[in-house]
Image (spheres, rainbow, N blue to C red):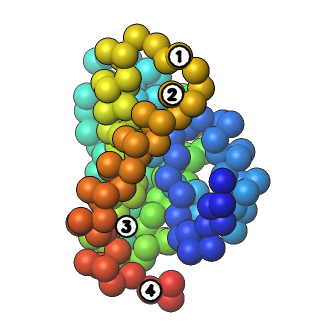
Amino acid sequence: RGLRGEQLWLVTVDGGRGLIAAVREVWPQVPLQRCWVHKLRNLAGRLAARHRQACLAEAKRIYLADSYRAALQRCRRWAERWRKLAPEAVAALEADIEELLAHMRALRQQPRLWVKVRTTNVIERLFRELRKRIRPMCGFSDDASCNRIVYMLFVKYNRQWQKRPLWPKYQLTQNS
């Protein structure tokens, strides 16, 4: 549909294998950021209920680090503490840690942006809004009617986002 991604610095995705494979196929040179919210939900399912709250609270501290190096150190400490109690959770996080911290390397000079790009929350919010608007319609007469409503909702949100641009505020440059 015309998106070339010539200025992409980072792509944030949930844990879906198909989406990850597609991004790597289309933009192999662009760093891939795994969503922390999705990863933590996945970890929660691998933890005993009695350990869940403490383990996840400590895991969240990893992405709150001030630098990539500090985040890796926090990850190592977290893994050492939880490896015996939750080996599956530790293995799952360690397997994806480079992609979970990609935002820190790709936007090293813009730490204020890290909170915006480390999750897919913005996209998820848009999809929730789409579902909320489409559900009362009960159905569409044809593909074109569905495309029109979805297109117009995306136009609406693009206009809203243009009123409060993210990039000029932080003056990003490719070499930063």
- In the rendered view, would you say 101 is above or below 45? below
For the view shown, which residue lies furthest in the top direction?
138
Tag shown at residue 141: 1
Quadrant of image for the C terminus: bottom left
Identified at 40% across, 11% down, the residue is 138
* Element type where label 2 sits in the image: helix
Are dots 2 and 3 in contact, CB under 8 Å? no
Give the class, few, some or many, for how many residues have Cα within 10 Å of label 2's Cα (few <14, many ≥20).
few
Q: Position of residue 111 (x, y in %)?
A: 32, 72
State the image quarter where residue 161 is shown: bottom left
**Mark 3 lies on residue:** 70
Are dots 2 and 1 in contact, CB under 8 Å? yes
**Mark 2 lies on residue:** 145
* Element type where label 3 sits in the image: helix
Q: Earlier in the sequence, mark 3 or mark 1?
A: 3
**Mark 4 lies on residue:** 173
Q: Earlier in the sequence, mark 1 or mark 4?
A: 1
State the image quarter where residue 128 is shown: top left
Instruction: For residue 78, say whether it is visible.
Output: no
Tag shown at residue 162: none
Marks 4/3: CA–CA distance:
24 Å
Q: Earlier in the sequence, mark 2 or mark 3?
A: 3
Mark closer to the observer (2, 4): 2
Q: In front here: 142 or 60?
A: 142
Give the class, few, some or many, for how many residues have Cα within 10 Å of label 4's Cα (few <14, many ≥20).
few
